[in-house]
Image (cartoon, grey):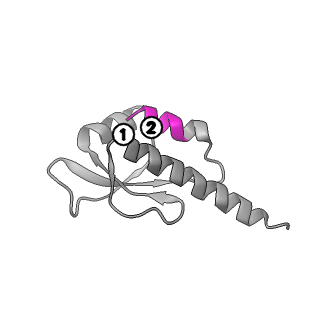
């Protein structure tokens, strides 16, 4: 009712955009443009390990087109993703 689904999707997409902007500001590159609520940054193996050790949950997506010691990871935001969660992830970089 009342386009509730749209509000939830808009929030998820906004959190993905915030995440992508923060990644870019920290010098990370994106493997693909952000079009919805998924972000695919290229991260070095040490960063991947550090983020996972800190409790971040994400999937290593691919190494295609990456440099030595790099991987593309898949980050997904949702209606439940808060700005604080995004900022916390970015602080862990």
Tell which of 25 and 12 is nearer to you.
Answer: 25
Q: Is residue 90 above or below residue 31?
A: above
The mark found on residue 65 in the picture is none
Tell which of 39 and 50 is nearer to you.
Answer: 39
Q: Mark 1 near mark 2, Cβ–Cβ under 8 Å?
A: yes
Label 2 packing within 10 angstroms: few (<14), some (14-19), many (20+): some
Q: Is residue 6 above or below residue 67?
A: below
Mark toward the start of the polypeptide (1 vs 2): 1
Q: Quadrant of the C terminus?
A: top left
| Disc 1 versus disc 2: nearer the observer | 1
Circle 1 residue = 26
Q: CA distance from mark 1 to mark 2?
A: 8 Å
Q: Quadrant of the N terminus?
A: bottom right
The dominant secondary structure in magenta is helix
Magenta-highlighted residues:
86-93
The mark found on residue 90 in the picture is 2
Q: Residue 14 appears in which quarter of the rendering?
A: bottom right
């Amino acid at each position: 009712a009342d386009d509730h689904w749209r509000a939830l999707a808009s929030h998820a997409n906004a959190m993905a955009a915030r995440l992508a902007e923060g990644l870019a500001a920290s010098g990370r590159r994106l493997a693909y443009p952000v079009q919805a609520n998924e972000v695919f940054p290229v991260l070095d193996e040490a960063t991947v390990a550090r983020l996972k050790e800190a409790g971040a949950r994400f999937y290593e997506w691919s190494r295609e087109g990456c440099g030595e010691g790099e991987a593309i990871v898949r980050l997904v935001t949702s209606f439940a993703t808060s700005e604080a969660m995004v900022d916390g992830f970015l602080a862990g970089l």
